Image (cartoon, rainbow, N blue to C red):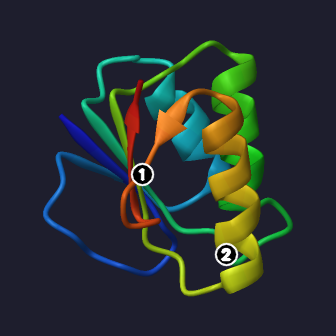
Amino acid sequence: MWLLIDDERDLNCDAIARTPEAARVLLKCDCWECVIFDHDLGCAKTGYDILMWMFESKVYPRRIQLVTSNPVGRDRMSAVLKENHYSSKDGYNYFKD
């Protein structure tokens, strides 16, 4: 199953979390093959914050996609993904090693 965490985009996914709170509830399922992250969520919390919470909660989906157009946010999220043993060939699609 695929989860999108984004306050605006509509992509063909099984579920969409529009808020950080909804993202945390859905991520607890730990059933996601792929989680798609935006950085800017229209509130104080960001996709980076959710990504950090996800790893602190020991949730490790096989695949993570970054769809953010925020270059600083993308770089921060990419660094955290690499620290948690995800690799990417294109900087958008990350796979668990």
Q: 10 Å neighbourhood of mark 1: few (<14), some, or many (≥20)?
A: some
Image quarter of residue 22: top right
Q: Amino acid at mark 1?
A: Ser
Residue at image point 23% right, 43% down:
2
Query: Does 66 sit above or below residue 14?
Result: below
Query: Does 75 sit above or below residue 88?
Result: below
- Looking at the image, residue 69 sits to the left or right of residue 45; the answer is left
Residue 65 in picture, x, y percent from top left: 39, 56
Q: Quadrant of the C terminus?
A: top left
Q: For numbered disc 1, what is the local secondary structure? A: loop
Q: 10 Å neighbourhood of mark 2: few (<14), some, or many (≥20)?
A: some
- Looking at the image, residue 21 sits to the left or right of residue 56; the answer is left
| Dot label at residue 61 | none
Residue at image point 67% right, 75% down:
40
Image quarter of residue 57: top right
| Dot label at residue 40 | 2
Q: Quadrant of the N terminus?
A: top left
Q: Amino acid at mark 2?
A: Asp
- Looking at the image, residue 30 sits to the left or right of residue 25; the answer is left
Which label sits in the foreground, 2 or 1?
Answer: 1
Nearer to the camera, 24 or 82: 82
- Residue extending furthest toward the front: 89
Residue 84 in picture, x, y percent from top left: 64, 28
Residue at image point 67% right, 25% down:
55
Residue 80 in picture, x, y percent from top left: 72, 43
Q: For numbered disc 2, what is the local secondary structure? A: loop
- Looking at the image, residue 9 sits to the left or right of residue 60; the answer is left
